[in-house]
Amino acid sequence: MLHFVHHPGYVAPAPKGSAFRFNKYGLVRDALADSGRAAAVHAPEPMPRRWIEAVHDADYVDEVMAAAVPQAKERRIGFAVTPAIRERSLLAQGGTWLAACLALEHGYAANGAGGSHHALPDTGAGYCVLNDLAVAANRLVAEGRARRVLVLDCDVHQGDGTAVLLAGRPDIFTLSVHAEKNFPARKARSSLDIGLPDGLGDDGYLAALEKSLPAVLDQFGPEIILYQAGVDPHRDDRLGRLGLSDAGLEARDRHVMAEARRRGVPLASVLGGGYGDDHGEVAARHVRTILALADEAAR
């Protein structure tokens, strides 16, 4: 049984002037239902504020909670933080947390949102308001649910906010596999960064992943993986600079899950990036990732 986390609040009205559309999250839910795969759908609760403030600056959390984020920060985010966006952000945080808890119980679970890896301590950035990966990783350790957490980021963009928020943590390892010349222009320092050249295709990408991931798993020994499973490394992605095919993305996801399963490490995936004018096709890519992970987990 696939365990999938979704909330109607994931589909928030796009603020005026925003180039980002939130309909992808509803389309992912619909495409998963249309796939015919049996799935238990779980609704998250908003993340309690205390866990957000454990990694984000309290003043910035105040701004988000009041839906009064300064315009300079909203420009960095890419849209205004309205009350609906605030609620959506809190639900997405709770969704990643719920997916992690379900993964600990069942081996694999997917959040149908999340992956806000550009959010920094005192501001959002790059369509990210609050960093669900950092919040969930910290809470897992703080509550004693896992002694060591690996945040594996295979989005085409470096997980700079996650790297900054979790820097220096011996109990949380951040591994980012990304296009080196893509956003953000100024990279942060993850525990391990794998910067890839523009246009890299399936074989080169998989070689880089196969070289880095097993060594990290063996040396760090995580008790859970939070997987930023963005589909923007796809060659047709509007904001990507890599050259993966549909088969390449599937091989990436199957490799990640196979390495986790081989070591008995549960994995929770988050949606991450995926961009294009054909929103239905982008949603289908996300669903193919979720199904590939679920199929490999069940082997």
Image (cartoon, rainbow, N blue to C red):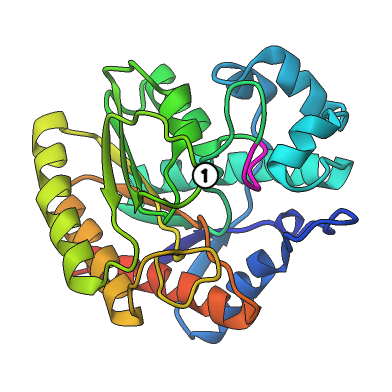
Where residue 23 appears, as percent x and y from the top left, is 72, 68
Q: Is residue 110 above or below residue 280?
A: above
Image quadrant where residue 56 sits: top right
Residue position marked by numbered label 1 in the rendering: 96
Q: Is residue 128 magenta?
A: yes
Q: Is residue 122 above or below residue 291?
A: above
Residue positioned 56% across, 59% down in the render: 112
Q: Quadrant of the C terminus?
A: bottom left
Q: Is residue 40 magenta?
A: no
Where residue 265 appears, as percent x and y from the top left, is 22, 45
Q: Is residue 50 left or right of residue 68?
A: left
Q: Considering depth in this image, is 246 or 38 the residue closer to the camera? A: 246
Other-residue count near label 1 (Cα within 10 Å), few / some / many at <14 / 14–19 / ≥20: many
Q: Quadrant of the N terminus?
A: bottom left
Secondary structure beneath disc 1?
Answer: helix
The chief SS type of the magenta part is loop
Q: Can see residue 1?
A: no
Residue positioned 49% across, 41% down in the render: 185
Residue positioned 67% across, 38% down in the render: 129
* Range of magenta residues: 125-129
Q: Is residue 121 above or below residue 202?
A: above
Where residue 197 appears, as percent x and y from the top left, is 29, 57
Where residue 224 appears, as percent x and y from the top left, is 29, 39
Residue positioned 45% across, 80% down in the render: 37
- The amino acid pointed to by label 1 is Thr
Q: Is residue 14 left or right of residue 193?
A: right
Q: Can see residue 273?
A: yes
- In this rendering, the count of numbered labels is 1
